[in-house]
Amino acid sequence: MKKIEKRYIIHTKGNKVLEYDLKTNEPVYWTRDFIKIFKLTITAADGSLKQEFTDLNTENHLVSETSPGLSFDDWNFDGCLDISLWKYIGGTLGNVPHYYWLWDNDTGMFVANEDLERISEGSHLEIDKENKRLTSYCKDGVWANYTDYYEFRNGKVELIKGVERYFDVTRWEEYDESYADRILIRILEPIDGERVLTQEYFVDADSKMIHHDPPQ
């Protein structure tokens, strides 16, 4: 497939918001500074309108004045840069919700990808360039974490494997929530559209930390 090389200019439209709130039982205010983006516009180098995405709903820290949560990466490994926009601060799962628009050579347009958006709602989604796959990570407190691996196949995001890790603390008299004696590993693979458990085994935790955050 011939790669189309174009130069576009990305514009975001939104508001910078500064909130004030009174601390409980204290005559002191705290503030919160964040950015809300509601429109993303793509123009050609000559200024003509290419595309416009409206009704966006973001609420984030201001990453920078020139790039409020925008990123440009090749999410589907086709050699073309795609667009992602940080939606809002994730929760205790470690999730980092984003909007995604992938470049489509056939139409010469950026197309919203709902699969990536859905995955990022519940996880931290990253690109594994070496293996040409995507990795999503989330956690369940200090007791478990989950990693899913995805590939783009025929233009679709498909799960290839899931790994679940459960941390087992057996020496309760020496209990420390940061450590485990062993880890239960569960491997799940897609079979006929369902996640099926294909392997289950314990490994020695070797006093490793339970709480594993994804690289930032």
Image (spheres, grey):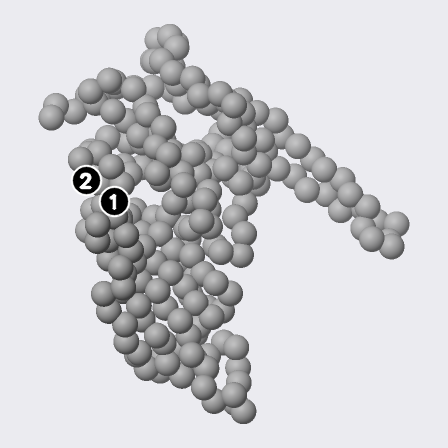
User: Element type at marker 2?
Assistant: strand
Instruction: State the image coordinates of residue 212 (x, y, percent, origin top left).
Output: 42, 65
The Cα–Cα distance between marks 1 and 2, rounded to whole angstroms, is 7 Å
The image's mark for residue 106 is none
Q: Is residue 216 visible to the viewer in this orientation of the structure?
A: yes
The quarter of the rendered structure image containing the N terminus is top left
The image's mark for residue 153 is 2
Residue found 25% across the figure and 24% down from its top:
104
Q: Where is 158 relative to 169, above or below? A: above
User: Element type at marker 1?
Assistant: strand
Q: Residues within 10 Å of mark 2 (few under 14, many from 20)?
A: few
Instruction: State the image coordinates of residue 56 (x, y, percent, origin top left).
Output: 51, 27
Residue found 24% across the figure and 18% down from its top:
107
Q: Which one is in front, 162 or 85?
A: 162
Q: Is residue 161 visible to the viewer in this orientation of the structure?
A: no
Identify which amino acid the numbered label 2 is placed on. Arg
Identify which amino acid the numbered label 1 is placed on. Glu
The residue most toward the left is 1
Q: Residues within 10 Å of mark 1 (few under 14, many from 20)?
A: some
Residue found 38% across the figure and 16% down from its top:
51
Residue that badge 1 annotates: 158
Query: Marks 2 and 1: in contact by CB < 8 Å?
Result: yes
